[in-house]
């Protein structure tokens, strides 16, 4: 980098109306066109925003969203087989085995042999304590969404998302 | 693998009520506990389902969701700078440059120099034709969701997702 201008020098072209007007305070749909009306795009943007909320709340306990969901399921249904937990969460087997290995290494869950071919998953005491703190943080986030979305809004959103998820897939 | 049993032999343990009852036709919340009531989980599952719909519709034209969104934005706002398209879509710069490179290699978009430091993005005729077909496929998917979600349901879902996305992030 041999440039001699200060890094913060204002750039004239950044202020030219031809290029920045659509982004400066204009409704987003002027820039992104019909995209904001497509469910896949709206879902992805909302999901990324909520995962960012997660990172700032439950994430501070050292858990990623998928790890949190695995702990919740094992707590709700202790003794399920690995394959059943993976199926309930819609996680592919290979990814799931890696995740279980990591949670076990962290001392949060343990595998107990069910028979010669399968193992059941249980929380350790440390895992149960971590999950309790995580649930507390998550319930606070959900309460914030409930206030944000107004009376019945959060429940309606969950219903609509459930309908989308369980819709028959075509094609 | 030296096992001698046929691979498709039914497994007795798979049918034992202790391990499969919660998954067999029972409401999902018996297995996943409070998870189904958390917005992040519900959003992620719905988003994955809708991306699967995309794969079966627009995806047949050889486009991934993020590529489709870039074409839509360039069509809606031709001549935007790379950095502006990336910002409008919330895509990180490095990922975005790789995506633009690929779309250019596919002959769907072109870079035109704006000045010494930035380039503007435009669709090629092939890109415009591809986008037209993609939009047609996408509108058919959206109409299916509109029927699925009942009167006003799709619009309400888009409103709620927008509120979640633009909520102030705490922490």
Image (cartoon, coloured by chain):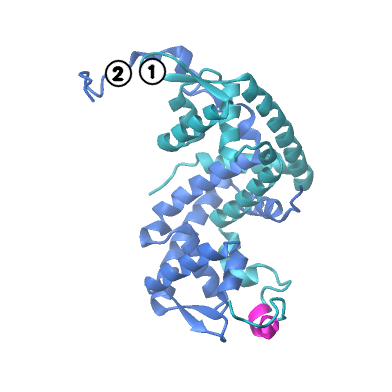
Chain colours: A cyan, B blue
The vertical placement of B136 against B32, above or below, is below
| Position of the N terminus of chain B by quadrant | top left
The vertical placement of A121 against A60, above or below, is above
Question: Can residue A14 be found in the magenta stretch?
Answer: yes
Residue sitting at 61 percent across and 72 percent down? B84
Q: Nearer the viewer, residue A92 or B159?
A: A92
Q: Secondary structure at mark 2?
A: loop
Residue sitting at 66 percent across and 45 percent down? A55
Q: Are marks 2 and 1 in contact (CB under 8 Å)?
A: yes
Question: Residue A144 appears at what percent x and percent y?
Answer: 77, 42
Q: Residues within 10 Å of mark 1 (few under 14, many from 20)?
A: few
Q: Which residue is mark 1?
A: B14
Label drawn at residue B105 = none
Instruction: Please name the predominant secondary structure of the magenta segment in the image.
Output: helix
Q: Is residue A88 visible?
A: no
Q: Which residues are magenta?
A: A11-20
Label drawn at residue B10 = 2
Q: Nearer the viewer, residue B130 or B150?
A: B130
């Amino acid at each position: 980098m041999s440039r001699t201008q200060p890094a913060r020098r204002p750039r004239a072209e950044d202020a030219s109306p031809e290029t920045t007007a659509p982004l400066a305070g204009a409704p987003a749909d002027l820039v992104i066109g019909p995209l904001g009306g497509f469910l896949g795009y709206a879902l992805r943007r909302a999901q990324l925003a909520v995962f960012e909320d997660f990172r700032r709340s439950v994430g501070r306990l050292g858990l990623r969203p998928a790890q949190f969901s695995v702990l919740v399921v094992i707590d709700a249904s202790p003794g399920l087989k690995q394959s059943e937990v993976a199926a309930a969460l819609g996680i592919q087997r290979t990814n799931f085995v890696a995740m279980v290995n990591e949670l076990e290494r962290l001392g949060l869950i343990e595998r107990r042999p069910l028979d010669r071919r399968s193992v059941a998953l249980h929380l350790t005491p440390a895992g149960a304590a971590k999950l309790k703190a995580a649930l507390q943080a998550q319930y606070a986030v959900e309460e914030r969404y409930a206030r944000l979305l107004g009376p019945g809004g959060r429940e309606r959103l969950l219903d609509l998302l459930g309908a989308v998820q369980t819709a028959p897939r075509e094609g």
